[in-house]
């Protein structure tokens, strides 16, 4: 089952919030259960590859976004991306049909003002690193659902074993084309 059908596919949200006629959206597991399963899956992946030594070994076998930046390489690529982001932000900010929250505008303006290559490389020398999916959203997830056992939250917000591989569903991630050597929280923010 494609997870975006459970959590609200972007296409349906932008088109009025309804799936195509005739498409039945399962009611179980709930969006909260799916979110818990997705975060638990991300945590397993991040834990397995946590730390620069593990990533260094892995990065040698494939190309991971962000790895070169940790070594101070790829400045042109980074500055081009940030420069494009600044231009598009100015265009978006100037739109008269959008009412921007002033705090959001101040935050994004401040972030772009502080975004320098030197600041990034300096930060990355000490930042935590793991394997990040890089495009961690519902459209890149499939759910194997087991109706008999559902994800059960435990004290402190952790998950019971029924939410893991043994039953209760499991999230599978695909489209790893944006995989990166980065902080795990980047995946969760998506």
Image: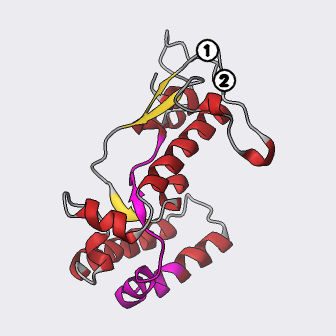
Question: Is 80 located above or below residue 154 in the figure?
Answer: below
Residues shaded magenta: 111-137
Residue at image position (29%, 64%) is: 65
Residue 36 picture location, percent across and down: 63, 39
Residue at image position (80%, 43%) is: 155
Residue designated by label 2 = 150
Q: Could you say which is closer to the camera, residue 95 or residue 183?
A: 183
Q: Secondary structure at mark 1?
A: loop
166 on left or right of 1? right
Residue 70 picture location, percent across and down: 33, 78
Residue designated by label 1 = 147
Q: Is residue 35 magenta?
A: no
Question: Total label count?
Answer: 2
Q: Residues within 10 Å of mark 1 (few under 14, many from 20)?
A: few
Residue 47 tag number:
none
Residue that sits furthest to the right in the current view: 155
148 on left or right of 86? right
Label 2 with label 1: CB-CB less than 8 Å: yes
Q: Is residue 117 magenta?
A: yes
| Residue 36, visible in the rendered structure | yes
Q: Could you say which is closer to the camera, residue 5 or residue 123?
A: 123
155 on left or right of 93? right
Q: Residues within 10 Å of mark 2 (few under 14, many from 20)?
A: many
Snapshot quadrant of residue 178: bottom left
Residue that sits furthest to the top in the current view: 22
Tell me how far mark 2 sits from mark 1, CA to CA.
7 Å
Residue 132 picture location, percent across and down: 41, 56
Residue at image position (64%, 18%) is: 27
| Residue 17, visible in the rendered structure | no
Q: Could you say which is closer to the camera, residue 132 or residue 155?
A: 155
Q: Secondary structure at mark 2?
A: loop
């Amino acid at each position: 089952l494609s997870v975006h059908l459970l959590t609200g596919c972007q296409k349906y949200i932008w088109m009025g919030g309804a799936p195509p006629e005739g498409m039945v959206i399962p009611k179980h597991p709930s969006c909260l259960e799916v979110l818990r399963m997705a975060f638990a899956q991300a945590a397993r992946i991040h834990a397995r590859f946590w730390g620069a030594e593990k990533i260094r070994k892995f990065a040698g076998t494939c190309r991971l976004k962000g790895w070169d930046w940790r070594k101070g390489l790829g400045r042109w690529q980074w500055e081009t991306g940030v420069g494009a982001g600044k231009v598009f932000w100015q265009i978006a900010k100037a739109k008269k049909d959008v009412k921007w929250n002033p705090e959001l505008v101040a935050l994004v303006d401040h972030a772009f003002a502080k975004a320098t290559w030197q600041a990034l490389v300096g930060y990355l020398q000490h930042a935590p690193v793991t394997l990040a999916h890089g495009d961690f959203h519902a459209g890149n997830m499939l759910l194997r659902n087991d109706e008999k056992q559902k994800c059960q939250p435990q004290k402190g917000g952790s998950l019971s074993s029924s939410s893991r591989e043994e039953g209760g569903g499991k999230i599978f991630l695909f489209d790893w084309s944006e995989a990166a050597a980065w902080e795990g929280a980047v995946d969760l923010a998506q």
